[in-house]
Image (spheres, helix red, strand yellow):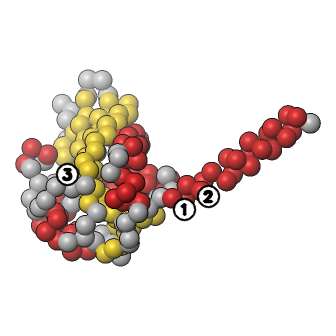
Amino acid sequence: MKRLLTYLSGALCLALTPVTQAGAQPSLVIQVPESFYQHPVRLLNPYLVYWHNRAEIAESVGLNSFQAQHYTTSSCQAEAQGQALVVIEPNMFYNPQTGVFYSEITARVYNTPAADSALGKPLMTVKGEGQSRGWLTYNVENFARQSYQQAFEQVIQKIQQNPAYEPSVVAAPVQTYQALCNSIDTLSQPKALF
């Protein structure tokens, strides 16, 4: 009987946990700058030429990762309404000798929707790294997704641990970030990333 009550109370606690977390998590706007869509990266291999479009995969994995952590997400192409804007800068590298995909996600979080805030300092900047083992000859996009997934898990964890997160993002009102999205798209990215 004690075991049954212990299992039932544990199951009840686990069932109520996502409900309480969902109410506490903010609404975010996710954006990958336009220049990452225009410049795919070549994954190195002596015998294959493979161009990886990192922006599309990183945006879809990013939206899914934040939603899995009970965030409400939207993109700049949709309504662009939220409590903060998260600008994602994805990078991918492939080591052909070991068959490992290395990814790095840099996320900059803005909480002011004005267009000129893109030129200023973001609220926080965090980096996450991931890796997955695979080959360029088979299912490349799946291995890239796995690597990006690990990087996004680190990014979300670092954002939540940042002391500026709670007062500046969770307590902020919902705003429209379309002007900031447009101004970030017009900024040029460093050539070292391409």
Amino acid type, label 1: Gly
What residue sits 31% from the left and 75% below the top? 176
Q: Nearer the viewer, residue 166 or 79?
A: 166
Please, is residue 16 above or below residue 94 in the view?
A: below
Q: Nearer the viewer, residue 133 or 171?
A: 171
Please, is residue 110 above or below residue 133 in the view?
A: below
* Residue closest to the far right: 1
* Residue 183 image offset from top left, x and y in percent: 15, 69
Eye-nearest disc, 3 or 2: 2
Amino acid type, label 2: Val
Please, is residue 111 above or below residue 41 in the view?
A: below
Labels 1 & 2 near each other (Cβ < 8 A): yes
Quadrant of the image occupied by residue 101: top left
* Residue 160 image offset from top left, x and y in percent: 40, 47
The span from disc 1 to disc 2 (Cα, nearest Å) is: 7 Å
Quadrant of the image occupied by residue 66: bottom left
Dot 1 or dot 3: first in sequence order is 1
What residue sits 13% from the left and 68% below the top? 116
Q: How many marks?
A: 3
What residue sits 80% from the left and 44% below the top? 8
Q: Nearer the viewer, residue 77 or 44?
A: 77
- Which residue position holds label 1? 23
Dot 3 or dot 2: first in sequence order is 2
- Which residue position holds label 3? 40
The span from disc 3 to disc 2 (Cα, nearest Å) is: 39 Å
Which quadrant would the N terminus be assigned to in this image?
Answer: top right
The span from disc 1 to disc 3 (Cα, nearest Å) is: 37 Å
Amino acid type, label 3: Pro
What residue sits 25% from the left and 28% below the top? 96
Residue 19, which numbered label?
2
